[in-house]
Amino acid sequence: MIGFFEYQYLKYKKNHLKNLVALAAIDGHIHDDEIAYLHKIGEKYQLKPQQIKKILDERENIEPNIPEHHHQKVALLYDLVGMMMADNVIEDSEMEFCKKMFEKFGYKELLIDEMIDLYRQGVEDTDTWEEFLERAELYRMNIASW
């Protein structure tokens, strides 16, 4: 039997992946490199291959989900940037989707450029990520409804 907190965390991980699938499908086709990236992220979150496949199969019904906490939002935005870059082609529709997500999450669009640079350099350790989380806070919009 799965407990409440385990269920909540599983739901968070699946929503994280669903947001990535929504971006991957935005141009009407999910590239093999994007599927590989989805599996990489799914494995990082210890999702089973059949869970990942189910999310991919249900891609038409995906509504983007906004995580609650700053670090969860930034982690998802980072993975969205990774998804956008997975096939080495940044489509206009993908960039627009990311911009909308950054705005929905309460971050200024300028964070995308810094995140792309960070993604290209790679995150080598926890300190680098923690520093980035602090810098990302500077890009937060002061919107009461978020």
Image (cartoon, rainbow, N blue to C red):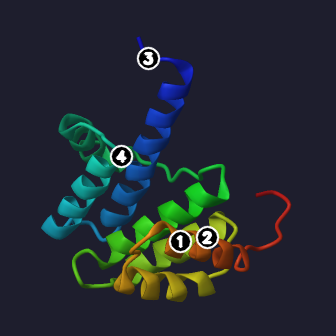
Give the residue number, with chain letter if any, for mark 1: 127
**Amino acid type, label 4:** Tyr
Crowd rating for badge 1 (residues with CA inside 10 Å; few <14, some 14–19, many 20+): few
* Structural crowding at the residue carrying mark 2, measured as other residues with C-alpha within 10 Å and reported as few (<14), some (14–19) or many (≥20): some
Above-or-below relation of 64 to 86? above
Disc 2 to disc 4, C-alpha distance: 20 Å
Front position among marks 3 and 2: 2
Q: Residue at x 38, y 65 (%)?
A: 23
Q: Is residue 137 shown left or right of residue 53?
A: right
Residue in the image at 18% along x and 61% along y: 36
Amino acid type, mark 3? Ile
Cα separation between marks 1 and 3: 33 Å
The kind of residue on which mark 2 rests is Leu
Q: Quadrant of residue 108?
A: bottom right
Q: Which residue is mark 2?
A: 133
Q: Which residue is mark 3?
A: 2
Find the distance from the CA under tag 3 to the CA under tag 2: 31 Å
Q: Is residue 137 left or right of residue 31?
A: right
